[in-house]
Amino acid sequence: MRILIALLFISVLASCKNDTSTTLSKPSNSTSEISNTETSAPKQREAVIDTETKDTLIYPEEGHFKNIRQVTFGGDNAEAYWSFDDKQLVFQSNYKEWGVECDQMFLMNADQTFKDSQPPMISTGKGRTTCAYFLPDNKHYVYGSTHLVDDNCPEVPLRKNGNYVWPVYDSFDIFVADLEGNITAQLTTEPGYDAEATVSPQGDKIVFTSTRSGDLELYTMNIDGSGVKQITYELGYDGGAFFSPDGTKLIFRSSRPKTEEEIKKYKDLLAEGLVEPVDMELYICDADGSNLKQLTNLGNANWSPFFHPSGNKILFSSNHEAERGFPFNLYLIDLDGRNLERVTHGETFDAFPVFSNDGKYLAFSSNRNNGGGRDTNLFIAEWQD
């Protein structure tokens, strides 16, 4: 479901304007290699321009990107997550030219691009899918799907009383499948929404969001679905969680209503299977839910967080500097909430940042180099601190 947030925000833009031998540093025909290979503090340099479109791939201020490669070239593509050996990624797309009507899961090798080709679909092609993540064997992945209830794509309401809303489908459950698309296990069977599953880098736990308590809370479970434990308990939408590299912490985003009016609005919407994903801040806690604290207090929407490979920083998307809802850019922040640093400098939308397990590369989604349209494409950048 996390990609739906992106689609809602893109609508806002239009209306108001997570084998090391794989080589990713070779640019495609439309990218340029950066000659400066220093790994010290990033330095401003010339923009990297797509030689075909003449559009910007790396902005001058984006010193953390040593080079970049565009992976997809149409549709809405997001949530590209690496296999444990960094050889492959799984991502979701609704690109109609690939024969899908709503989000389905696709598999790619880490060095592939899809300008003139199509990746294999590895979900059922039924219902709507979300939030795929590799399991430690690199041969299976978990993902959410609505296909048990309906083969068709569920309706996506975009507004409620004039405000943007996000559906929380009760039909979502979490499944395990192999890389040929065969479902091998169903991990959740509770009534209500179960989705947004991600896997600890230690390979022992899964964190996910569920409404089984009556609210949208975080839970963890073992890789086989056993040992389910509730992690968060406060009213509000807790979701989009990721483990730290050592598996000891969780970072997530939350919209937590405080006033009576906010609480009533949240509860009324949730009763209809809806939420408003607009005001969100980042929270961090230990993997068992203890030591919970609010990490950001920036205002607007702060979301899609992912741990820096060091485990000492969080990379996330935010529009807190925006006056009219956009742009969304990527930011780094320390675990104590200090040293906020802007990483990307686009004018529209950058989100869903995910580091490779070896820490060398960053996959993210962006509206850059899309001809001024609404397509959200995948990019992979070689990272430098």
Image: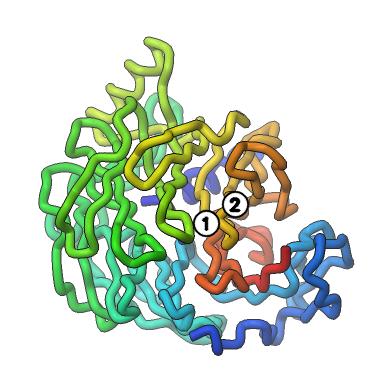
Mark 1 touches mark 2? (CB < 8 Å): no
What residue lies at 42% left-to-right and 47% top-to-bottom?
A: 250
Residue under label 2, please give it. Answer: 312
Residue at the spot 53% in from the left edge and 44% down from the top edge: 9
Residue marked by disc 1: 352
Left or right for 242, reference 382:
left
**Quadrant location of residue 374?**
bottom right
In the rendered view, tell whether residue 363 sits above or below residue 109.
above
Q: Residue at x 33, y 73 (%)?
A: 136
Percent from the top left, x then y, of residue 81?
A: 44, 67
Crowding near the residue tagged with mark 2, few <14, some 14–19, many ≥20 C-alpha atoms within 10 Å: few
Rendered residue at 70%/86% (across/down):
29
Front in this rendered view, residue 172 or 313: 313
Look at the numbered disc 2 and give the secondary structure of its residue.
loop
Residue 63 versus residue 29 in the image, above or below: above
Which of the 4 image quadrants contains residue 158? top left
The amino acid type found where label 1 is placed reads Phe
Closer to the observer: label 1 or label 2? Answer: 2
Residue furthest to the top: 260
Nearer the N terminus, badge 1 or badge 2?
Answer: 2
Residue 268 vs residue 335, the one in the foreground? 335
